[in-house]
Image (cartoon, grey):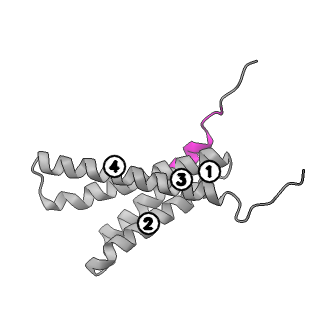
Amino acid sequence: MSERKRFPAGFGVWLFAGLMGALMMAVCLAGMAFLMVSRELSGSSAALLATVAAGAGSFFSGWLAAFRNREGGLLCGAVQGLIFAALLAILTFPAGFPMERSILTRFAVAVLCGILGGFLGVRVPAKKHIH
């Protein structure tokens, strides 16, 4: 049986991890929207809660990509973090995309959470089957 090389290597894993991270982010956003309504929080807390949700999604997607690849955790996490930073950029673009310190901090949080997730994803031990 010949061995096929896939190009790009592991694209399905990266895509799956990104989609699962986006799902995690959506669930976090829904939970935080419920929290805002139930606790009657002001609209100024929305940016912080959205940053936390993006960080959680980035962390989860970086962890999942690194866990499935079993190598290159920092690279997996960095790529997933950059994807979530790009999502944040796209979501803030309609608001005029001002390059303020707070927006740059949100981008940094997304990238760093992805890197941390990738770093930890490689370190999860694989299941050992005892026969």
Q: Nearer the viewer, residue 52 or 129?
A: 129
Which residue is identified by label 4? 27
Give the structural element (helix, strand or loop) at label 4: helix
Tag 1 residue: 73
Query: What residue is shown with label 3?
Result: 17
Mark 3 and mark 2 lie on one chain; the one further toward the N terminus is: 3
The reply to whether the magenta stretch includes residue 46 is no
108 displayed left or right of 9: left
* Membership of 118 in magenta stretch: yes
Q: Position of residue 88 (x, y in %)?
A: 38, 67
* Circle 4 Cα neighbour tier, 10 Å, few/some/many (<14 / 14–19 / ≥20): some
Badge 1 amino acid: Gly
Which amino acid, mark 3?
A: Ala
Pick whichever, 57 or 78, lies toward us: 57
For the point 14% across and 61% down, which residue is it? 43
How many labels were placed on the picture? 4
**CA separation, marks 3 and 1?**
13 Å
Label 3 neighbourhood size at 10 Å, few (<14), some (14-19), many (20+)? many
- Dot 1: few (<14), some (14–19), or many (≥20) neighbours within 10 Å? many
- Write down the region rendered in magenta: 117-126
Q: In the image, what residue occupies the spot 48% across and 56% down?
A: 19
- Mark 3 / mark 4, whichever is N-terminal: 3
Rendered image: mark on residue 85: 2
Q: CA distance from mark 3 to mark 4?
A: 15 Å
Q: Quadrant of the C terminus?
A: top right
Give, as a three-letter code, the residue at label 2: Ala
What residue is shown at x 73% (from left), y 19% (from top)?
Answer: 130
Residues at circles 3 and 2 in contact by the CB criterion of under 8 Å: no
Q: Amino acid at mark 4?
A: Val
